[in-house]
Image: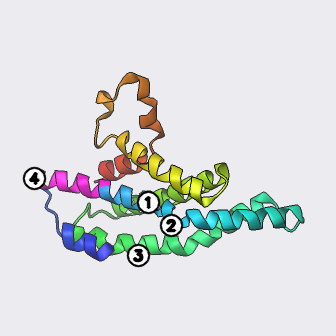
């Protein structure tokens, strides 16, 4: 995916004509990172049954399971870093080291946010069928209220709170402001 992003968006200029393309790239990246939750959802149900069994037998506590889940994600965070290093300089994003590390932080934060979201869906639903049915409805709704498709000022007052709950909002805004 990093190679495709580099080929498609490679060496964007700094002029105002390419600014829209940069914003669109940030939006695509947010969506891509948000859909990672689809990949891990089935595993959450398998692990939940294992957790209940081990927890009831006194093998480990909930906090131990939580930290084990965090440690399991560390290799994937490394791949997020490699993914970012491949296309960041190729595309010609903001060349400062501080901006690059902030960008990397935002990518990793969105990764953990999408994984946490999948864990919450798995905790609130009985099986992968229900979780798999809910997730595709929540993610597009979150995307609609994020601020790219409809600006915050144009969202009706009675649903503006959805703008602040959008899982894409903060990552996308952070990436755009960083650029």
Q: Look at the image and give the residue range highlighted in magenta.
A: 15-27
Is disc 4 placed on a helix, strand or loop? Answer: helix
Badge 1 density bin: few <14, some 14–19, many ≥20, Cα 10 Å: some
Residue lying at 25% horizontally and 62% vertically, measured from the top left? 93
Badge 2 density bin: few <14, some 14–19, many ≥20, Cα 10 Å: few
Is disc 2 placed on a helix, strand or loop? Answer: helix
Residue 110 falls within the magenta-colored stretch: no
Percent position of residue 179, x then y: 28, 54
Spatial CA distance of label 2 from label 1 is: 8 Å
Q: Is residue 158 left or right of residue 131?
A: left
Q: Is residue 124 left or right of residue 19?
A: right
Q: Earlier in the sequence, mark 3 or mark 4?
A: 4
Return the residue at label 4: 17
Q: Earlier in the sequence, mark 2 or mark 4?
A: 4
Front residue of 111/156: it is 156
Spatial CA distance of label 3 from label 4 is: 29 Å
Contact between marks 2 and 1 (CB within 8 A): the answer is yes
169 shown above or below 72:
above
Residue 16 falls within the magenta-colored stretch: yes
Q: Earlier in the sequence, mark 1 or mark 4?
A: 4
Residue lying at 38% horizontally and 61% vertically, measured from the top left? 32
* Circle nearer the viewer, 3 or 1: 1
Badge 3 density bin: few <14, some 14–19, many ≥20, Cα 10 Å: some
Q: Earlier in the sequence, mark 2 or mark 3?
A: 2
Front residue of 98/150: it is 150
Return the residue at label 3: 82
Disc number placed over residue 35 in the picture, else none: 1
Q: Quadrant of residue 40?
A: bottom right
Percent position of residue 166, x then y: 44, 42
């Amino acid at each position: 995916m990093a190679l495709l992003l580099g080929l498609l968006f490679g060496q964007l200029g700094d002029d105002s004509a390419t600014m829209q393309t940069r914003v669109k790239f940030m939006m695509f990246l947010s969506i891509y990172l948000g859909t990672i939750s689809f990949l891990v959802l089935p595993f959450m149900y398998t692990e939940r049954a294992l957790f209940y069994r081990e927890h009831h037998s006194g093998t480990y506590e909930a906090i131990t399971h939580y930290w084990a889940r965090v440690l399991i994600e560390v290799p994937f965070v490394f791949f997020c870093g490699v993914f970012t290093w491949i296309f960041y300089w190729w595309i010609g994003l903001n060349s400062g080291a501080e901006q690059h590390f902030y960008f990397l932080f935002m990518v990793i934060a969105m990764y953990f946010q999408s994984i946490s979201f999948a864990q919450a869906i798995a905790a609130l639903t009985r099986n992968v069928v229900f979780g798999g049915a809910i997730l595709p409805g929540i993610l597009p709704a979150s995307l609609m209220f994020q601020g790219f498709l409809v600006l915050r000022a144009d969202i009706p007052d009675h649903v503006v709170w959805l703008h602040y709950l959008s899982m894409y909002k903060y990552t996308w805004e952070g990436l755009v402001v960083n650029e």
